[in-house]
Amino acid sequence: MAQFNTKLFFLFIFFITSLTTHAGSFKDGLSAWLAEKYDKAFKILRPLAHLGHAPAQVVIGLMYENGQGIEPNPDQAIKWYKLAADQGEPEGQYRLGCMFLTHDEECHQVDAVKWFLAAAEQGHKYAQYKIGLMYREGVGIDQDSVEAAHWLTLAAEQSVPGAQTVLGILHERGEGVEQNFQTALKWYRLAAEQGEPQAQCNLGVMYQHGRGVSVDCREAMKWYQAAADQGYAPAQFNLGLFWQKGLCGASDFDKAISWYQKAADQGEPHAQCNLGLCYHQGLGTTVDLQAAAHWYRKAAEQGLPEATNALPVVLRLLEQQASHHAGSDQSSSILGSF
């Protein structure tokens, strides 16, 4: 999912703070930071942060978090984000929530919810996205699909592509909202046009199966291709399937195997199974039972029933093959003794 552009945020913050106390010094420090002159930025901004300048505190926190001109220090990053957050600075609240979310402990997840909510209520779109995800997944807070849809809608309306994608999923499935394929299509398209690969793939599925739109395999393939080119494994599998079955024209097993391989290498179980099938039956390649067993096993280990059923068949064929070779070797040895 697309990430928040931190430096664009601080360009905006500069304009907000340009008429406040210490504005000149903050402008100089911010300009140095944006130019990646981190030593100079730290020397200017750290004194301001000590004086309670919230935007400066956030930048110092970022420098400690990312090791910009100083050694990375998560504890120091949390300290400075907390000082800004306590002053009601939404970016500090959001960043503090992100720091807490990196911890697995439930108490830290609860803290993350607290700070994401504080920032979200001030309109911070990425905090709205985060809290929407946490409500949907029940992380640090009771699962609530309606609340998830509420916050994700607010973030999606501010053009956050990840939020638009998840909101599309909610509308497609009817989670926390009334099921509506047309609305799902709308949100998928908005995210897909921003380059969000999951949305591009989901949009392809909508066109392939005619959900909220007329079936259009060429349009489906276009969006699968866009996502696959970004390395999105489900889209690579779908593209492989299109080429195998010739859903947009003639079949092309070479292309099918190529896309299955890309997805399988990323652990996509359906691609692993179909790649196993190609090697098992010699579809677009020579029969290779060892390779078939390898990919069936990979998919079976992820619980895919088709692979679980196919693997014993290939293993029996390999046993028969080995037995036949052993018999041939023995016959050759006997013949050679005469």
Image: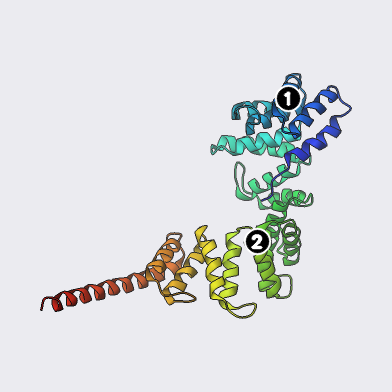
User: Nearest the camera: 301 or 23?
Assistant: 23
Q: Residue furthest right?
A: 19
Image quarter hosting the C terminus: bottom left
Q: Earlier in the sequence, mark 2 or mark 1?
A: 1
User: Nearest the camera: 6 or 322?
Assistant: 322
User: Nearest the camera: 18 or 109?
Assistant: 18
Q: Indicate the amino acid at tag 1.
A: Lys
Residue 298, position as x, y percentages in the image: 43, 61
Where is mark 2, residue-wise?
227
Where is mark 1, residue-wise?
40
Q: Indicate the amino acid at tag 2.
A: Ala
Is residue 163 positioned above or below 31 on the image? below
**Quadrant of residue 65 in the image?**
top right
Residue 25, position as x, y percentages in the image: 81, 23
Dot 1: few (<14), some (14–19), or many (≥20) neighbours within 10 Å? some
Residue at image x 75%, y 44%?
125
Q: Residue furthest bottom?
A: 250
